[in-house]
Image: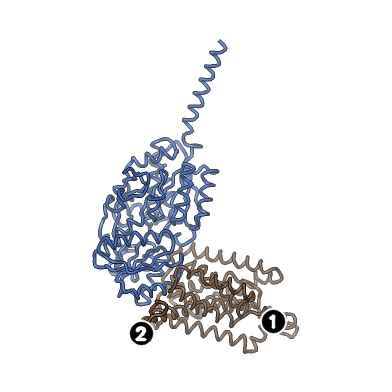
Amino acid sequence: MQMKKLTTLACAAAFAMLSGAASAQISGNTVKIGVLTDMSGTYSDLAGAGAVLATQMAIEDFIAEAKPAFKVEMVSADHQNKADIASNKAREWFEREGVDTATELVTTSTALAVMKIAKEMNRVALMSGPASTPITNEQCNDVTVHYTYDTYALANGTAKAVTQQGGNTWFFLTADYAFGQALEKDSSAVVTANGGKVLGSVRHPFPASDFSSFLLQAQASGAKIIGLANAGADTTNAIKQAAEFGVTPKQSLAGLLMFISDVHSLGLQATQGMYLTTGFYWDLDDQTRAWSKRFFEKQKRMPTMVQAGQYSSVLHYLRAVQATGTDEAGKVMAQMKATPIKDFFGKNGRIREDGRMVHDMYLAQVKTPAESKYPWDYYHIRQTIPAEEAFQPLAQSKCPLVKK
Amino acid sequence: MEIFGVPSALLGSQLLVGLINGSFYAILSLGLAIIFGLLNIINFTHGAQYMMGAFVAWIALNKLGINYWVALLFAPIVIGALGVLIERTMLRKLYKLDHLYGLLLTFGLALIFEGIFRDQYGISGQSYPVPELLQGGVNLGFMFLPIYRGWVVVAALTVCFATWFVIEKTKLGAYLRAGTENAQMVQALGINVPLLITFTYGFGVALAAFAGVLAAPVYQVSPLMGSNLIIVVFAVVVIGGMGSIMGSILTGLGLGLIEGLTRVFYPEASAVVVFVIMVIVLLVRPAGLFGKA
């Protein structure tokens, strides 16, 4: 009798614990999103405060649409483009503050550091800002999504178009770190594959302000095209000084990674006619205009592709949490990969097994001052590169998660 | 013709570009050297003051319609006046304390100034056009020299040597130098030393702002333009010898040239070459090349 009572009690207790566990599938009943970005350095205009705003917008829109039973919170921090700061912060967030996902992570070195910690702690890493292909190749893991663009897609858009239009000899000005080297490598491959020739390259320190020496070397090479395998302030300074030293218009520049914030700060006079590849343009259609207008009202600048991608990735993540009823990384990732992405940013988007979010990319050409009719009217979209062609094919992937 | 596998034309152009960068180093390190020499303050705000000089020129052009030539005078006066205010209200209280306090104060101010401009203008910066008179370039045979860059060298060197002349060869300069050696004695002789110090700080800051205006048409006018440059400039001052006027000018030019050559032979090292030289100089001559031990 006594025994039976004990058994009943134990069963009741076990059941109580089980149901307790079920209701605690979202830890603390709160989903915490960490935005780890460059708030003050070279990349703070293309990511930074705009990425934080995009995250807030995604959270607000998600709460309005899904009315979730759990709370959604956001924390943000400045990683100063330093891998050690980024990894310390991510560890603190995951271990002590119950952050479920570290997001944005512009600058490849910070992204590579944080994705390892995310894997170790079984949390999700959503990469909107970084560019390098190793994130979904050699270094890939099953908790990371590389969302907005990568160096392969950039090279595949810009380098291909420019080479095919007769720009068949290239010289690279490369930022001397993981991102610049990856961009140079991917672009060289595309140039060669399309019948062009790479005459040489020079690696400049990151960040640099004076490019005259490097530009003179590019000038001496006699290449038709000078490929700028750098980003942010490095790109804008190089473009400005190329005009000053008479490098352009005799030789043409190809900005391999240019954001709308760069075009805005340089002005159309200096950038007209340049080709660039982008994952997003605010003036593409009614959906992009509607969202961008909301963004502009708060930020007073039009969104870059990183900021738009940040919104889309956070919303996709939150919807997956809602659908699975858990914040456990493995289950959320499975749901995110199983669900196609259809919003103003991700046209025909889906997340592949290597963590790459593939979506339509655009080859844009910068308008001349005369062609630009209203503020931020900067691009002609010359070509839409379909999602399946825009990114590195899985057959070439070096990611161990890809079954061949 | 080739020298060490590099065409001599390319080498010539790199030396010229080095000289251009060297003149920026010279004019910035000169301001630092003057301030350190007389005030014993390591002015970490120097980079921010250089940046603000460029921004004042940009604002003057776009909001007030003040052209480049007026801005060359206007920006140094505005930023110099700000310097005077800083000296009168803050720095003055720190002279008797350790160097470290002055360093921390000026470093803090630099962060505040950069933060304000970053908040207002973002990081990508603004474009400042080259003034009409100095547009275009000349073909020197071995390179295409933008006229503006040539002007930078002339303007920077003229200001540097004029400053050197005033400090080393005039009566005002003699007061300044005497004030550095023994402030009490000079004060006793009826010279207003605190005023002299305020004026010196304001002038050193104005030099930074002048360099900022010179730089505006060359680089993007951005909140971080100063902090990118200032570390190298500190190395220049250390190599030249803290407080040595001529030392800072010559070292600035010389290091510009060496950096230019590094960019041809081993570009990856061009960001560190100045610091390697600094280490060597500190080991061999701890007071710097032109400093008095």
Looking at the rendered structure, the number of numbered marks drawn on it comes to 2
Tell me which residue sits at (39%, 80%) in the image. B2
Name the element at disc 1. helix
Rendered hue of chain B is brown
Residue B62 image-quadrant placement? bottom left
Residue A161 placement, left or right of B12:
left
Query: In which quadrant will I find the C terminus of chain A?
Result: top left
Query: In which quadrant will I find the N terminus of chain A?
Result: top right
Tell me, yes or no, if residue A286 can be seen here.
yes
Tell me which residue sits at (49%, 69%) in the image. B271
Q: How is the image coloured?
A: by chain
- Look at mark 2 in the image and give the residue it sits on: B141
Image location (x, y in percent) of residue A240? 38, 72
**Which sits earlier in the primary sequence, circle 2 or circle 1?**
2
How many neighbours does mark 1 have within 10 angstroms: few (below 14), some (14-19), or many (20 or more)? many
Image location (x, y in percent) of residue B9? 38, 81
- Which dot marks residue B269? none
Q: Chain of mark 2?
A: B
* Chain coloured blue in the rendered structure: A
Q: Comparing marks 2 and 1, which lies closer to the viewer? A: 2
- Look at mark 1 in the image and give the residue it sits on: B179
Above-or-below relation of B153 to A101: below
Image location (x, y in percent) of residue A44? 45, 59
Residue B90 placement, left or right of A41:
right
Tell me, yes or no, if residue A49 can be seen here.
no
Name the element at disc 2. loop
Q: Chain of mark 1?
A: B
- Label 2, label 1: how many angstroms apart (C-alpha)? 50 Å
How many neighbours does mark 2 have within 10 angstroms: few (below 14), some (14-19), or many (20 or more)? few
Amino acid identity at mark 2? Gly
